[in-house]
Image (tube, rainbow, N blue to C red):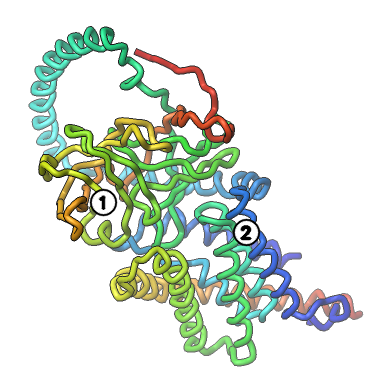
Amino acid sequence: MKNFRNKKKRLPTKYVLLIMTGICVSAIFLSLTLNISGGPLNSIAGYVFVPMQKGINDAGLWLYSKSNDFKTLGEVLDENKKLQAQVDELTTKLTTTKLERYELDTYRELLALDETYADYDKVAANVIAKDSGNWFSTFTIDRGSRDGLKKGMNVIAGSGLVGIITEVGPNYAKVRSIINDTSNVSAMVANTQDNFNVSGNLMTMNQGGVITFSELKDEDDEVKVGDEVVTSFVSDQYQQGILIGYIASIEDNSNNLTKSGTITPVVDFEHIQVVLVITKLKETGEENDGAETTPEPESVTQ
Amino acid sequence: MLRKITLFFIISICFVLQTTVFQALSFANIAPNLLIIVVSSFGFMRGKKEGLFVGFFCGLLIDIFFGFYLGVYALIYMYIGYINGIFQKRFYPDDIKLPMLLIGASDIVSNFIIYFVMFLFRSRFRFWYYLSSVIIPEFVYTMVITILLYFILLKMNQGLEAYEKRRAKKFDL
Protein backbone atom coordinates (compact mmCIF):
# COMPACT_ATOMS: atom_id res chain seq x y z
CA MET A 1 0.00 0.00 0.00
CA LYS A 2 2.73 2.38 1.01
CA ASN A 3 4.80 1.54 -2.04
CA PHE A 4 1.87 2.33 -4.23
CA ARG A 5 1.33 5.74 -2.69
CA ASN A 6 4.72 7.24 -3.36
CA LYS A 7 5.90 5.23 -6.26
CA LYS A 8 6.85 8.33 -8.18
CA LYS A 9 9.66 9.60 -6.00
CA ARG A 10 11.26 6.20 -5.31
CA LEU A 11 14.46 4.94 -6.86
CA PRO A 12 14.45 1.34 -8.10
CA THR A 13 15.92 -0.93 -5.43
CA LYS A 14 18.74 -1.98 -7.75
CA TYR A 15 20.12 1.54 -7.73
CA VAL A 16 19.67 1.88 -3.98
CA LEU A 17 21.71 -1.32 -3.62
CA LEU A 18 24.40 0.08 -5.89
CA ILE A 19 24.59 3.36 -4.01
CA MET A 20 24.73 1.65 -0.62
CA THR A 21 27.40 -0.74 -1.90
CA GLY A 22 29.40 2.27 -2.98
CA ILE A 23 29.01 3.81 0.46
CA CYS A 24 30.15 0.60 2.16
CA VAL A 25 33.12 0.07 -0.13
CA SER A 26 34.29 3.65 0.29
CA ALA A 27 33.87 3.33 4.08
CA ILE A 28 36.04 0.20 4.02
CA PHE A 29 38.69 1.96 1.96
CA LEU A 30 38.59 5.05 4.16
CA SER A 31 39.06 3.06 7.32
CA LEU A 32 41.78 0.95 5.64
CA THR A 33 43.83 3.83 4.30
CA LEU A 34 43.22 6.70 6.71
CA ASN A 35 42.75 4.47 9.73
CA ILE A 36 39.72 6.44 10.81
CA SER A 37 36.68 4.58 11.98
CA GLY A 38 33.26 5.85 12.76
CA GLY A 39 33.94 9.30 14.11
CA PRO A 40 30.57 10.82 14.97
CA LEU A 41 28.95 7.43 14.35
CA ASN A 42 30.94 6.06 17.27
CA SER A 43 29.63 8.73 19.61
CA ILE A 44 26.01 8.32 18.57
CA ALA A 45 26.14 4.55 18.78
CA GLY A 46 28.01 4.79 22.06
CA TYR A 47 25.42 7.01 23.70
CA VAL A 48 22.52 4.87 22.48
CA PHE A 49 23.76 1.34 23.07
CA VAL A 50 26.29 1.47 25.87
CA PRO A 51 23.71 2.40 28.56
CA MET A 52 21.47 -0.47 27.42
CA GLN A 53 24.28 -3.00 27.50
CA LYS A 54 25.38 -1.68 30.86
CA GLY A 55 21.88 -2.06 32.26
CA ILE A 56 21.55 -5.64 31.08
CA ASN A 57 24.97 -6.49 32.43
CA ASP A 58 24.19 -4.98 35.81
CA ALA A 59 20.99 -7.01 35.95
CA GLY A 60 22.94 -10.12 34.98
CA LEU A 61 25.60 -9.50 37.60
CA TRP A 62 22.94 -8.96 40.23
CA LEU A 63 21.28 -12.28 39.35
CA TYR A 64 24.65 -13.98 39.33
CA SER A 65 25.52 -12.66 42.79
CA LYS A 66 22.08 -13.67 44.09
CA SER A 67 22.47 -17.20 42.77
CA ASN A 68 25.90 -17.34 44.33
CA ASP A 69 24.39 -16.56 47.71
CA PHE A 70 22.80 -19.98 47.63
CA LYS A 71 26.15 -21.69 47.73
CA THR A 72 25.97 -24.05 50.66
CA LEU A 73 27.51 -22.98 53.91
CA GLY A 74 29.68 -26.08 54.00
CA GLU A 75 31.29 -25.15 50.73
CA VAL A 76 32.06 -21.70 52.01
CA LEU A 77 33.49 -23.02 55.26
CA ASP A 78 35.67 -25.44 53.37
CA GLU A 79 36.89 -22.69 51.17
CA ASN A 80 37.54 -20.52 54.20
CA LYS A 81 39.77 -23.17 55.72
CA LYS A 82 41.74 -23.52 52.53
CA LEU A 83 42.06 -19.78 52.16
CA GLN A 84 43.22 -19.40 55.75
CA ALA A 85 45.99 -21.90 55.06
CA GLN A 86 46.85 -19.98 51.94
CA VAL A 87 46.93 -16.70 53.85
CA ASP A 88 49.41 -18.14 56.34
CA GLU A 89 51.57 -19.46 53.57
CA LEU A 90 51.46 -16.22 51.67
CA THR A 91 52.25 -14.11 54.72
CA THR A 92 55.47 -15.98 55.27
CA LYS A 93 56.24 -15.67 51.59
CA LEU A 94 55.50 -11.98 51.73
CA THR A 95 57.96 -11.30 54.50
CA THR A 96 60.75 -13.01 52.60
CA THR A 97 59.73 -11.18 49.45
CA LYS A 98 59.76 -7.90 51.34
CA LEU A 99 63.30 -8.53 52.40
CA GLU A 100 64.28 -9.46 48.89
CA ARG A 101 62.48 -6.43 47.57
CA TYR A 102 64.41 -4.17 49.89
CA GLU A 103 67.61 -5.70 48.67
CA LEU A 104 66.48 -5.39 45.08
CA ASP A 105 65.59 -1.74 45.54
CA THR A 106 69.05 -0.93 46.67
CA TYR A 107 70.52 -2.75 43.71
CA ARG A 108 68.13 -0.99 41.38
CA GLU A 109 69.06 2.36 42.74
CA LEU A 110 72.59 1.49 42.01
CA LEU A 111 71.72 0.58 38.47
CA ALA A 112 69.12 3.32 38.08
CA LEU A 113 66.64 0.84 36.79
CA ASP A 114 63.53 2.06 38.58
CA GLU A 115 61.79 2.87 35.39
CA THR A 116 61.89 -0.61 33.95
CA TYR A 117 59.59 -2.06 36.54
CA ALA A 118 57.62 1.06 37.41
CA ASP A 119 54.05 0.49 38.52
CA TYR A 120 51.70 1.70 35.88
CA ASP A 121 48.70 3.89 36.58
CA LYS A 122 45.55 1.95 35.93
CA VAL A 123 41.86 2.59 35.44
CA ALA A 124 39.28 -0.07 36.20
CA ALA A 125 36.53 -0.76 33.68
CA ASN A 126 33.67 -3.22 33.26
CA VAL A 127 33.23 -5.46 30.27
CA ILE A 128 29.83 -4.58 28.83
CA ALA A 129 29.50 -6.51 25.57
CA LYS A 130 31.23 -9.24 23.66
CA ASP A 131 31.67 -9.71 19.95
CA SER A 132 28.38 -10.60 18.30
CA GLY A 133 29.88 -13.28 16.10
CA ASN A 134 31.77 -16.41 16.98
CA TRP A 135 34.91 -15.77 14.98
CA PHE A 136 36.66 -13.08 16.91
CA SER A 137 37.34 -12.26 20.49
CA THR A 138 36.85 -8.57 20.95
CA PHE A 139 34.77 -6.84 23.58
CA THR A 140 33.78 -3.37 24.69
CA ILE A 141 34.37 -1.78 28.09
CA ASP A 142 32.40 0.99 29.75
CA ARG A 143 35.10 3.64 29.71
CA GLY A 144 36.21 5.74 26.80
CA SER A 145 37.94 8.92 25.79
CA ARG A 146 36.05 10.85 28.47
CA ASP A 147 37.91 8.82 31.08
CA GLY A 148 41.21 9.48 29.37
CA LEU A 149 41.52 6.22 27.48
CA LYS A 150 43.32 6.22 24.17
CA LYS A 151 43.86 3.81 21.34
CA GLY A 152 46.83 1.56 22.01
CA MET A 153 46.52 1.32 25.79
CA ASN A 154 47.10 -2.10 27.29
CA VAL A 155 44.34 -3.91 29.12
CA ILE A 156 45.04 -6.37 31.94
CA ALA A 157 42.91 -8.43 34.29
CA GLY A 158 44.22 -9.85 37.51
CA SER A 159 47.87 -10.26 36.79
CA GLY A 160 47.77 -11.09 33.12
CA LEU A 161 47.54 -9.34 29.80
CA VAL A 162 44.07 -9.26 28.26
CA GLY A 163 44.59 -7.17 25.15
CA ILE A 164 44.85 -3.74 23.67
CA ILE A 165 42.40 -0.92 22.99
CA THR A 166 41.85 -0.64 19.26
CA GLU A 167 39.25 2.09 19.23
CA VAL A 168 37.71 4.56 21.65
CA GLY A 169 34.33 6.20 21.68
CA PRO A 170 33.36 8.86 24.21
CA ASN A 171 31.93 6.38 26.69
CA TYR A 172 33.22 3.01 25.53
CA ALA A 173 36.35 1.42 24.17
CA LYS A 174 36.88 -1.57 21.94
CA VAL A 175 39.40 -4.10 23.20
CA ARG A 176 41.03 -6.76 21.05
CA SER A 177 42.06 -9.63 23.28
CA ILE A 178 45.31 -11.54 22.83
CA ILE A 179 43.38 -14.72 22.03
CA ASN A 180 41.76 -13.00 19.05
CA ASP A 181 42.73 -14.73 15.83
CA THR A 182 44.30 -11.58 14.36
CA SER A 183 46.24 -10.58 17.47
CA ASN A 184 50.04 -10.62 17.61
CA VAL A 185 52.17 -9.79 20.63
CA SER A 186 55.95 -9.62 20.86
CA ALA A 187 56.77 -11.59 23.95
CA MET A 188 59.73 -13.09 25.70
CA VAL A 189 60.43 -15.94 28.02
CA ALA A 190 60.89 -14.36 31.43
CA ASN A 191 63.96 -16.28 32.54
CA THR A 192 65.92 -16.52 29.29
CA GLN A 193 64.77 -13.25 27.70
CA ASP A 194 64.33 -14.90 24.31
CA ASN A 195 62.05 -12.88 22.10
CA PHE A 196 59.30 -14.47 20.10
CA ASN A 197 55.90 -13.85 18.67
CA VAL A 198 52.62 -14.82 20.38
CA SER A 199 49.53 -14.94 18.19
CA GLY A 200 45.95 -15.66 19.05
CA ASN A 201 44.33 -18.63 17.38
CA LEU A 202 40.67 -19.53 17.38
CA MET A 203 41.29 -23.20 16.70
CA THR A 204 43.82 -23.92 19.45
CA MET A 205 41.82 -21.75 21.85
CA ASN A 206 38.68 -23.79 21.19
CA GLN A 207 40.47 -27.11 21.37
CA GLY A 208 42.67 -26.68 24.39
CA GLY A 209 42.44 -23.16 25.73
CA VAL A 210 45.88 -22.26 24.42
CA ILE A 211 47.31 -19.71 22.01
CA THR A 212 50.27 -20.22 19.72
CA PHE A 213 53.77 -18.82 19.64
CA SER A 214 56.37 -18.92 16.89
CA GLU A 215 59.88 -17.82 15.97
CA LEU A 216 61.45 -18.72 19.26
CA LYS A 217 65.22 -18.95 18.85
CA ASP A 218 66.48 -21.23 21.53
CA GLU A 219 69.58 -23.09 20.40
CA ASP A 220 70.55 -24.31 23.84
CA ASP A 221 67.13 -25.79 24.62
CA GLU A 222 66.80 -23.65 27.72
CA VAL A 223 63.12 -22.88 27.38
CA LYS A 224 60.93 -25.47 29.05
CA VAL A 225 57.25 -26.22 29.37
CA GLY A 226 55.85 -24.14 32.22
CA ASP A 227 58.13 -21.17 31.71
CA GLU A 228 56.63 -17.74 32.24
CA VAL A 229 55.96 -15.65 29.15
CA VAL A 230 55.82 -11.86 29.48
CA THR A 231 55.49 -9.01 27.02
CA SER A 232 58.77 -8.04 25.47
CA PHE A 233 60.67 -4.78 25.58
CA VAL A 234 60.86 -4.76 21.78
CA SER A 235 57.07 -4.58 21.43
CA ASP A 236 55.90 -1.22 20.17
CA GLN A 237 52.37 -1.67 21.47
CA TYR A 238 52.62 -3.45 24.78
CA GLN A 239 54.29 -2.32 27.97
CA GLN A 240 57.15 -4.49 28.99
CA GLY A 241 56.91 -7.27 31.52
CA ILE A 242 53.17 -7.99 31.65
CA LEU A 243 52.50 -11.66 32.22
CA ILE A 244 50.86 -13.41 29.26
CA GLY A 245 50.87 -17.02 30.35
CA TYR A 246 52.89 -20.18 30.63
CA ILE A 247 54.38 -22.31 27.90
CA ALA A 248 52.22 -25.40 27.37
CA SER A 249 54.11 -27.16 24.60
CA ILE A 250 57.20 -26.63 22.44
CA GLU A 251 58.07 -28.17 19.12
CA ASP A 252 60.95 -27.70 16.70
CA ASN A 253 60.19 -26.10 13.38
CA SER A 254 61.23 -27.85 10.20
CA ASN A 255 63.99 -25.29 9.64
CA ASN A 256 65.70 -26.39 12.88
CA LEU A 257 66.39 -22.78 13.75
CA THR A 258 63.25 -21.70 15.49
CA LYS A 259 60.66 -23.29 17.70
CA SER A 260 56.96 -22.86 17.97
CA GLY A 261 54.33 -24.12 20.34
CA THR A 262 51.47 -23.12 22.59
CA ILE A 263 50.94 -20.93 25.63
CA THR A 264 48.23 -21.17 28.26
CA PRO A 265 47.07 -17.62 29.02
CA VAL A 266 46.73 -16.70 32.69
CA VAL A 267 43.54 -14.73 32.18
CA ASP A 268 40.24 -16.58 32.14
CA PHE A 269 38.84 -15.07 28.96
CA GLU A 270 35.45 -16.74 29.37
CA HIS A 271 34.61 -14.91 32.54
CA ILE A 272 36.20 -11.48 32.35
CA GLN A 273 34.05 -8.91 34.09
CA VAL A 274 36.42 -6.25 35.33
CA VAL A 275 39.59 -5.21 33.57
CA LEU A 276 42.30 -2.66 34.30
CA VAL A 277 43.51 -0.29 31.61
CA ILE A 278 47.10 0.90 31.86
CA THR A 279 46.83 4.59 31.11
CA LYS A 280 50.37 4.85 29.86
CA LEU A 281 51.09 4.36 26.20
CA LYS A 282 54.18 2.56 25.11
CA GLU A 283 56.78 5.09 24.12
CA THR A 284 58.15 3.99 20.84
CA GLY A 285 60.38 6.95 20.13
CA GLU A 286 58.57 7.63 16.91
CA GLU A 287 57.62 11.27 17.08
CA ASN A 288 55.79 11.43 13.77
CA ASP A 289 52.51 9.89 14.83
CA GLY A 290 51.55 12.12 17.68
CA ALA A 291 48.19 10.49 18.24
CA GLU A 292 49.79 7.23 19.22
CA THR A 293 52.58 8.52 21.42
CA THR A 294 51.57 11.19 23.83
CA PRO A 295 54.43 12.92 25.60
CA GLU A 296 53.21 11.94 29.02
CA PRO A 297 55.49 12.69 31.93
CA GLU A 298 57.09 9.53 33.16
CA SER A 299 55.20 8.65 36.27
CA VAL A 300 57.53 6.82 38.56
CA THR A 301 55.28 5.69 41.32
CA GLN A 302 57.55 3.74 43.51
CA MET B 1 7.29 6.42 10.92
CA LEU B 2 5.97 3.86 13.39
CA ARG B 3 7.64 1.18 11.29
CA LYS B 4 11.01 2.93 11.51
CA ILE B 5 10.76 3.36 15.26
CA THR B 6 9.72 -0.27 15.71
CA LEU B 7 12.55 -1.46 13.48
CA PHE B 8 15.02 0.64 15.44
CA PHE B 9 13.84 -0.96 18.67
CA ILE B 10 13.87 -4.48 17.23
CA ILE B 11 17.41 -4.06 15.92
CA SER B 12 18.74 -2.49 19.09
CA ILE B 13 17.12 -5.01 21.39
CA CYS B 14 18.45 -7.90 19.33
CA PHE B 15 21.92 -6.36 19.15
CA VAL B 16 22.05 -5.73 22.89
CA LEU B 17 20.75 -9.20 23.69
CA GLN B 18 23.16 -10.83 21.29
CA THR B 19 26.18 -9.06 22.73
CA THR B 20 25.27 -9.52 26.40
CA VAL B 21 22.76 -12.18 27.39
CA PHE B 22 23.42 -14.63 24.60
CA GLN B 23 27.18 -14.33 25.01
CA ALA B 24 26.64 -15.42 28.60
CA LEU B 25 24.35 -18.23 27.46
CA SER B 26 26.77 -19.48 24.84
CA PHE B 27 27.43 -23.21 24.53
CA ALA B 28 31.08 -24.05 23.92
CA ASN B 29 31.80 -20.44 22.99
CA ILE B 30 29.12 -20.41 20.33
CA ALA B 31 26.37 -17.81 20.53
CA PRO B 32 23.38 -17.53 18.18
CA ASN B 33 23.14 -14.81 15.58
CA LEU B 34 19.96 -12.86 16.29
CA LEU B 35 20.71 -10.06 13.87
CA ILE B 36 20.84 -12.40 10.89
CA ILE B 37 17.35 -13.61 11.85
CA VAL B 38 16.09 -10.02 11.89
CA VAL B 39 17.78 -9.11 8.59
CA SER B 40 16.62 -12.24 6.82
CA SER B 41 13.06 -12.08 8.18
CA PHE B 42 12.51 -8.48 7.20
CA GLY B 43 14.04 -9.27 3.84
CA PHE B 44 11.54 -11.94 2.87
CA MET B 45 8.61 -10.43 4.76
CA ARG B 46 8.98 -6.92 3.39
CA GLY B 47 11.01 -7.09 0.22
CA LYS B 48 14.39 -6.12 -1.13
CA LYS B 49 14.52 -2.50 -0.09
CA GLU B 50 13.61 -2.95 3.54
CA GLY B 51 15.86 -5.99 3.76
CA LEU B 52 18.67 -3.95 2.33
CA PHE B 53 18.33 -1.14 4.86
CA VAL B 54 17.74 -3.38 7.87
CA GLY B 55 20.82 -5.34 6.83
CA PHE B 56 22.88 -2.22 6.37
CA PHE B 57 22.08 -0.84 9.82
CA CYS B 58 22.55 -4.18 11.60
CA GLY B 59 25.91 -4.60 9.89
CA LEU B 60 26.91 -1.03 10.68
CA LEU B 61 26.22 -1.62 14.38
CA ILE B 62 28.47 -4.67 14.42
CA ASP B 63 31.11 -2.72 12.51
CA ILE B 64 31.08 0.15 14.98
CA PHE B 65 31.38 -1.98 18.08
CA PHE B 66 33.27 -5.06 16.97
CA GLY B 67 34.29 -4.76 13.34
CA PHE B 68 37.79 -4.59 11.93
CA TYR B 69 37.05 -2.07 9.18
CA LEU B 70 33.93 0.05 9.05
CA GLY B 71 31.61 -1.26 6.37
CA VAL B 72 32.55 -4.92 6.05
CA TYR B 73 29.64 -6.34 8.00
CA ALA B 74 27.35 -3.61 6.67
CA LEU B 75 28.11 -4.78 3.14
CA ILE B 76 27.64 -8.49 3.91
CA TYR B 77 24.39 -8.02 5.85
CA MET B 78 23.04 -5.59 3.28
CA TYR B 79 23.39 -8.13 0.49
CA ILE B 80 21.89 -10.82 2.68
CA GLY B 81 18.86 -8.62 3.32
CA TYR B 82 18.55 -7.81 -0.36
CA ILE B 83 18.82 -11.41 -1.53
CA ASN B 84 16.24 -12.51 1.04
CA GLY B 85 13.98 -9.83 -0.36
CA ILE B 86 13.92 -11.62 -3.72
CA PHE B 87 11.98 -14.44 -2.04
CA GLN B 88 9.17 -12.16 -0.88
CA LYS B 89 6.90 -13.44 -3.65
CA ARG B 90 7.21 -17.00 -2.39
CA PHE B 91 6.62 -16.09 1.23
CA TYR B 92 3.44 -17.12 3.03
CA PRO B 93 3.11 -16.32 6.72
CA ASP B 94 1.67 -19.72 7.63
CA ASP B 95 4.53 -21.69 6.15
CA ILE B 96 7.58 -21.95 8.34
CA LYS B 97 9.70 -24.04 5.97
CA LEU B 98 10.81 -21.23 3.69
CA PRO B 99 11.68 -18.81 6.53
CA MET B 100 13.71 -21.49 8.33
CA LEU B 101 15.49 -22.38 5.12
CA LEU B 102 16.29 -18.78 4.26
CA ILE B 103 17.45 -17.81 7.75
CA GLY B 104 19.62 -20.91 8.00
CA ALA B 105 21.12 -20.31 4.58
CA SER B 106 21.76 -16.65 5.41
CA ASP B 107 23.59 -17.58 8.60
CA ILE B 108 25.76 -20.15 6.85
CA VAL B 109 26.52 -17.90 3.90
CA SER B 110 27.48 -14.95 6.11
CA ASN B 111 29.83 -17.17 8.11
CA PHE B 112 31.33 -18.58 4.91
CA ILE B 113 32.09 -15.07 3.72
CA ILE B 114 33.70 -14.14 7.03
CA TYR B 115 35.77 -17.33 6.95
CA PHE B 116 36.96 -16.71 3.40
CA VAL B 117 37.74 -13.04 3.92
CA MET B 118 39.19 -13.07 7.40
CA PHE B 119 40.60 -16.56 7.90
CA LEU B 120 41.47 -18.15 4.58
CA PHE B 121 43.36 -15.07 3.45
CA ARG B 122 45.48 -15.29 6.59
CA SER B 123 46.32 -18.90 5.65
CA ARG B 124 44.05 -20.62 8.15
CA PHE B 125 43.32 -23.52 5.84
CA ARG B 126 41.56 -25.98 8.15
CA PHE B 127 38.17 -25.33 6.61
CA TRP B 128 36.57 -28.49 7.97
CA TYR B 129 37.55 -27.63 11.47
CA TYR B 130 36.01 -24.18 11.26
CA LEU B 131 32.95 -25.59 9.55
CA SER B 132 32.32 -28.16 12.24
CA SER B 133 33.26 -26.08 15.26
CA VAL B 134 31.95 -22.62 14.39
CA ILE B 135 29.67 -22.55 11.38
CA ILE B 136 27.51 -25.62 12.05
CA PRO B 137 27.07 -25.04 15.81
CA GLU B 138 26.11 -21.43 15.23
CA PHE B 139 23.66 -22.56 12.55
CA VAL B 140 22.02 -25.05 14.91
CA TYR B 141 21.78 -22.59 17.80
CA THR B 142 20.44 -19.87 15.52
CA MET B 143 17.80 -22.23 14.17
CA VAL B 144 16.61 -22.99 17.70
CA ILE B 145 16.30 -19.28 18.47
CA THR B 146 14.63 -18.68 15.10
CA ILE B 147 11.60 -20.77 16.10
CA LEU B 148 10.92 -18.25 18.90
CA LEU B 149 12.12 -15.02 17.41
CA TYR B 150 10.65 -15.52 13.96
CA PHE B 151 7.11 -15.67 15.28
CA ILE B 152 7.61 -12.54 17.36
CA LEU B 153 8.93 -10.71 14.30
CA LEU B 154 6.10 -12.07 12.14
CA LYS B 155 3.43 -10.89 14.58
CA MET B 156 5.06 -7.47 14.88
CA ASN B 157 5.23 -7.12 11.12
CA GLN B 158 1.60 -8.14 10.75
CA GLY B 159 0.62 -5.61 13.37
CA LEU B 160 2.57 -2.91 11.57
CA GLU B 161 1.05 -3.81 8.22
CA ALA B 162 -2.45 -3.63 9.66
CA TYR B 163 -1.69 -0.23 11.17
CA GLU B 164 -0.29 1.04 7.87
CA LYS B 165 -3.36 -0.16 6.03
CA ARG B 166 -5.65 1.72 8.41
CA ARG B 167 -3.61 4.89 8.02
CA ALA B 168 -3.56 4.60 4.24
CA LYS B 169 -7.36 4.29 4.23
CA LYS B 170 -7.67 7.38 6.38
CA PHE B 171 -5.65 9.37 3.87
CA ASP B 172 -7.65 8.07 0.93
CA LEU B 173 -10.88 9.36 2.35
How packed mark 1 is, by other alpha carbons closer than 10 Å (few <14, some 14-19, many 20 or more), is some
Asked if badge 2 and badge 1 are on a common chain, one would say yes
Name the front one of labels 2 and 1. 1
Horizontal side of residue A282 vs A260, given as left or right: right
Q: Which residue is mark 2?
A: A29
Q: Nearer the viewer, residue A1 or B172?
A: A1
Q: Quadrant of residue A133?
A: bottom left
Task: Count neighbours of disc 2 (C-alpha within 10 A) and say few if under 14, some if 14 to 19, many if 20 or more.
Answer: some
Q: In the rendered structure, which amino acid carries the disc numbered 2? A: Phe
Picture coordinates of residue B77, whole percent (x, y): 57, 70
**Quadrant of image for the N terminus of chain A:** bottom right
Q: Is residue B147 visible?
A: no
Q: CA distance from mark 2 to mark 1?
A: 31 Å
Q: Say above or below: A119 vs B172.
A: above
For image coordinates 31% across by 36% down, the residue present is: A231
**Of residues B155 and B146, which is closer to you in this image?**
B146
Residue at image position (33%, 36%) is A157
Q: Is A92 displayed left or right of A277 in the figure?
A: left
Secondary-structure class at tag 1: strand
**What residue appears at the point 22 percent right and 38 percent down from the top-left corner?**
A194
Residue under label 1, please give it: A214
The mark found on residue A77 in the picture is: none
**Does B70 sit left or right of A12 as displayed?**
left
- The subunit carrying tag 1 is A
Look at 33% across and 42% down and name the residue there. Answer: A186
Q: Is residue A86 above or below residue B31?
A: above
Residue A174 position within the rendered picture, expressed as x and y whole percent measured from the top left: 49, 45
